[in-house]
């Protein structure tokens, strides 16, 4: 029979090939330099890469080809790493600034030297951990530590990565990856060759294709009578089929929603495409203040958003400008001292926080008590790493009524943590533009350490009064993806959106 293997075991059906499998095997047998990578074989043979890969896998199951697999690891500088290589690491720049300033540097001096707050904090922490910098301000080098080296270990590794060197200090590479200065890329390289059986297998002539299935059309026309059918290969492994199951992250989110409903909260939703009024202004975030960049909103060009009702817009504008609200004699506070710009308020953005849902809820329901939550997607410009993504899910909510205090918010955080089996949590003061006082709750991840999960605080009067709310209200926005990492034992937030079926079924680590 054309296409059958002479060396099939006794009692086994002969090996047969489909048209694409035959073309791939012919191309492999005609290749001199073996084994050959998939991309190169596709280029030489003219077979589309996706079709070639599928045919190679089927030929491998029929023991007609063999594969060599190699894993390649490449280290590259991120844009932040390239900048650090060009202008210097923050700790090197702080050392240079100290030298230029005669060994003493104030906070203002550090700013004039080009170090922003984030870079200054990172540099101070690193230099103090290594014993080169005295505690306190102004900054001074520790006399007993000796002179810092000409090249810091991180500077050496940055240059090695930029030069493509492979022998690197893995501990320092790991530290640079956590600082998002270096990125590790891993890929698998497969090289293929015919097996001994694949070289011996007689191949059917072109045009002598055999049928693989008996279709209704062939039955109706009778065309099957003069055709040959490919036999089954009983040696081919049978794929294991598992039943459908919910995605573990989606299922966990549903459980968390049920936990909140059980605590007496109602669920609300809001639009993903927002205006800056609802995303920022109503939350008393100044239209031109640097604090607004905390959220790194993604703006949309070419369209204009719809402004809220005129009375609400007038109250929010009065709070921003430090004027009395319409109908009142005294202002809530000094405001921001600038003219409130309606054009900025109408600009459309992708929602950067579900606090906008809370604001819309309070505007529609200004009478207490308040127990509301929203669990939905948000978008920010972020460096994608194990803890951050451009798109993320946030669980936002409010808790309010007569006598509500920060203690109620802390108690709710602890109830939520215990409800999903987390026992370790610590609280510390924090800052958010629209709450005062503000706190952050941290839980311990077994691999990543303490992670900030529960930010919240008491909404400021400048937020509540324009919305017509006269009682204290606590607001919170849970990093639900990070909380799921702890609850599900995930080490990288990107694994929550894993599309590898083997990993999702738990067949791989």
Image (cartoon, helix red, strand yellow):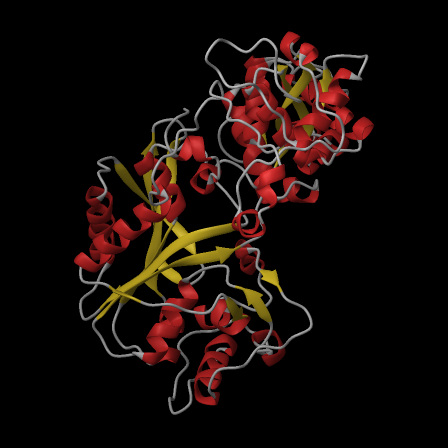
Nearest to the observer: residue 142 or residue 68: 68
Nearest to the observer: residue 493 or residue 417: 493
Q: Is residue 99 visible?
A: no
Vertical order, 419 against 407 (above or below) = above
- Which quarter of the rendered picture does the C terminus lie within? top left
Vertical order, 265 against 117 (above or below) = below
Nearest to the observer: residue 38 or residue 204: 204
x 23%, y 55%: residue: 258
Residue 237's x, y, as percent? 46, 22
Residue 269's x, y, as percent? 37, 67
Vertical order, 58 against 325 (above or below) = above
Residue 370's x, y, as percent? 24, 69
Q: Quadrant of residue 127?
A: top right
Vertical order, 72 against 120 (above or below) = above
Q: Quadrant of residue 146?
A: top right
Across the whole image, how many numbered discs are drawn on residues? 0
x 57%, y 29%: residue: 230
x 17%, y 57%: residue: 262
Residue 379's x, y, as percent? 52, 56
x 44%, y 35%: residue: 501
Taking 443 as reference, is 227 left or right?
right
Nearest to the observer: residue 98 or residue 126: 126
Taking 21 as reference, is 443 left or right?
left
- Which quarter of the rendered picture does the N terminus lie within? top right
Q: Quadrant of residue 38?
A: top right
Q: Is residue 481 visible?
A: yes
């Amino acid at each position: 029979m054309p296409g059958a293997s002479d060396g099939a075991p006794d009692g086994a059906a002969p090996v047969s090939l489909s048209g694409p499998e035959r073309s791939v095997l012919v191309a492999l047998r005609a290749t001199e330099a073996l084994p050959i990578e998939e991309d190169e074989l596709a280029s030489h043979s003219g077979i589309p890469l996706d079709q070639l890969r599928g045919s190679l896998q089927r030929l491998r199951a029929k023991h007609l080809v063999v594969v060599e697999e190699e894993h390649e690891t490449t280290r590259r500088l991120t844009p932040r790493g390239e900048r650090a290589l060009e202008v210097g690491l923050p700790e090197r720049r702080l050392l240079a600034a100290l030298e230029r300033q005669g060994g003493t540097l104030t906070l203002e001096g550090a700013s004039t030297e080009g170090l922003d707050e984030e870079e200054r904090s990172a540099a101070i922490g690193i230099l103090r951990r290594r014993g080169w910098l005295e505690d306190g301000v102004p900054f001074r080098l520790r006399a007993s530590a000796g002179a810092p080296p000409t090249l810091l270990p991180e500077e050496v590794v940055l240059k090695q990565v930029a030069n493509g060197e492979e022998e690197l200090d893995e501990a320092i590479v790991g530290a640079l990856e956590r600082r998002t200065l270096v990125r590790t890329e891993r890929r698998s390289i497969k090289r293929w060759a015919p097996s001994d059986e694949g070289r011996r297998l007689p191949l059917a002539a072109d045009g002598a294709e055999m049928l693989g299935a008996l279709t209704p059309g062939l039955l109706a026309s009778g065309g099957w009578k003069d055709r040959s059918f490919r036999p089954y290969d009983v040696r081919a492994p049978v794929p294991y089929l598992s039943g459908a199951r919910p995605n573990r992250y989606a299922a966990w989110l549903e459980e968390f929603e049920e936990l909140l409903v059980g605590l007496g909260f109602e669920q609300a939703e809001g639009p993903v495409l927002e205006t800056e009024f609802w995303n920022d202004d109503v939350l008393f975030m100044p239209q031109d203040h640097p604090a607004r960049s905390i959220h790194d909103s993604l703006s949309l060009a070419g369209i204009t958003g719809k402004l809220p009702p005129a009375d609400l817009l007038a109250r929010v504008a009065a709070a921003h400008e430090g004027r009395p609200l319409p109908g009142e004699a005294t202002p809530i506070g000094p405001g921001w001292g600038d003219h409130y710009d309606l054009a900025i308020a109408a600009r459309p953005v992708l929602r950067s926080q579900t606090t906008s849902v809370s604001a819309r809820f309070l505007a529609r329901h200004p009478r207490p008590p308040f127990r509301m939550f929203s669990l939905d997607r948000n978008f920010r410009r972020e460096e994608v790493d194990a803890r951050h993504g451009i798109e993320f899910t946030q669980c936002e909510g409010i808790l309010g009524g007569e006598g509500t205090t920060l203690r109620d918010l802390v108690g709710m955080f602890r109830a939520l943590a215990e409800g999903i089996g987390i026992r370790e949590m610590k609280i510390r003061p924090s800052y958010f533009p629209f709450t005062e006082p503000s706190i952050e709750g941290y839980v311990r991840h077994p691999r990543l350490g303490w992670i900030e999960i529960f930010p919240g605080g008491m909404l400021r009067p400048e937020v509540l009064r324009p919305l017509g709310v006269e009682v204290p209200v606590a607001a919170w926005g849970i990093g639900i993806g990070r909380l799921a990492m702890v609850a599900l034992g995930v080490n990288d937030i990107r694994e929550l959106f894993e599309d590898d079926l083997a990993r999702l079924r738990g067949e791989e680590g």
